[in-house]
Amino acid sequence: MTRSSQPEDTEVDAVQENIRGKLIEPADPEYDDARTIWNAMIDRYPAFVAQCTGAADVIAAVNFAREHDLLVAVRGGGHNVAGNAVCDDGLVIDLSAMNGVRVDPETKTVRVGGGATMGDLDHETQAFGLATTGGVVSTTGVAGLTLGGGLGRLDREFGLTIDNLLSADVVTADGELVYTSEDDHADLFWGLQGGGGNFGIVTSLEFQLHDVGPDVLVGQVIHPIEAAADVLHYYRKFMADAPDHVQCSAIFSQVPALPEFPQELHGQTVLVLVPFCSNANNEAEELLEPVRTFGDPIEDTVQPQQYTTYQQSSDKLFQAGHRNYWKSHFMNGLSEGAIDTIIEHVTPIPSPFTTVFFEWMGGAIRQVDPSATAFPHRDAAFSFTVAPKWTDPGRDDELISWAREFHEAMSPYAADGVYVNYLDDDEEDRVRTAYGERYERLVDLKNEWDPTNLFRMNQNIKPTV
């Protein structure tokens, strides 16, 4: 914050009077909690945190930031790996209190506040046996997940989260509230469907819902690391032939010392397949039976479970307070060389809670017109992510280097592009790669809606005006 733009005390008092939420400053007792986010690697000190309760608060906060040339960070769920939800010296616009969810069971639609998490969304929609594609950790913010595309357990059946987005309310850099849909500000709506937080602050979103649950068939099939090559070969074939309503992620991890895992597995590096079917009938049992019986798994926990229960099952593995540094590729296939490279780098996994995971795509993702949204990677077979987690700052260099070396070793087997939601804060040069040929259209939108780049704490698309 420059000296010339430093707000006077009277101006700070004025903006506090204009918001129903609280404007927190460094001297306030709530300050440390207000600036803390999911990734413990991020330790930043904003000048102000505006805890907003509605769109009017967001408008007042944006106007305050623009008038005083404050750097703006936007916090929804605060779950972004790169830590863009908080900044040094500027203003954090915190939407976490804006977490309302309103379901219309007749139209199978839902309106979600900009600070709602997947847990908030799933809790309300499942009361009516409905769901939409969302992340696999319940503390993930719905808005942030959506703006980058939205992978999840239901994406092969119902498309990405953006494919289910019907409309959104956006506060622009000018402090205006704009309603967007396919019929209203259609270009902006297109940009929100994968273009990140570059064009404004999304204060609410409307989604199409689908019949899901309450019970689904899902669980973990755990294999020893020694069987990983054979299992990955089978996994590749199983997913290539699987119908769209079957999903199966794969995860390498060091089994953490948590009570839900057998004690004899604690500390071991394993390969976990997570087959999923959005119903729990006899057909689902038959579809998942082959992946459950292949090889000699250590454990098989696949069974009918409530959808909301399983949506929270990864929360401890991806809990707040760990240091996180992720590197990701899209992949078109799983070749012999790729399998060998993966096994070389995961033997062993270097720390508890660290994961290396595959999110299989295809199905309904590919059935959407490639030009319909700003998300350009619909032909990829899967997303592959190296995600070390640790608690000791003394291991930062070691685990960041491991992730970077692993990621580089996988580059020869990778497809073009990267999932923008998994870009870390040192990957500015990959933003253009993340959008490919759509990048110039996104720049045009940035020029129109945020020419001064007020919203730049994100995977930033820089304006050219």
Image (cartoon, rainbow, N blue to C red):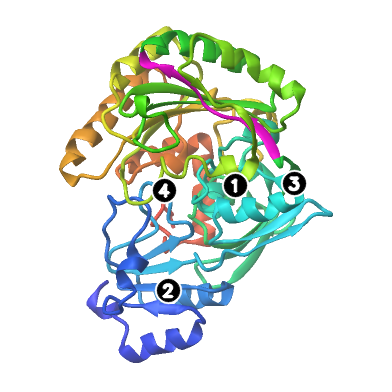
Q: Is 97 inside the magenta-drawn segment?
A: no
**Kind of residue at badge 1:** Gln
Q: Which residue is mark 2?
A: 50
Please give the name of the residue rendered at 29% of the width and 43% of the height, measured from the top-left corner: 426
Q: Position of residue 61 (x, y in %)?
A: 46, 75
Please give the name of the residue rendered at 52% of the width and 68% of the height, measured from the top-left corner: 97
Q: Position of residue 273 (x, y in %)?
A: 51, 23
- Which circle's residue, 1 or 2, is located before the other in the chain? 2
Which is in the foreground here, disc 3 or disc 1?
A: 3
Q: Which residue is mark 4?
A: 459
Query: What are the residue bounds of the magenta stretch?
Result: 215-225
Please give the name of the residue rendered at 41% of the width and 10% of the height, measured from the top-left corner: 227
Q: CA distance from mark 4 to mark 1?
A: 14 Å
In this view, the residue in front, 230 or 369, is: 230
Q: Position of residue 89 (x, y in %)?
A: 28, 68
Q: CA distance from mark 2 to mark 4?
A: 22 Å
Q: CA distance from mark 1 to mark 2?
A: 26 Å
Q: CA distance from mark 4 to mark 3?
A: 35 Å
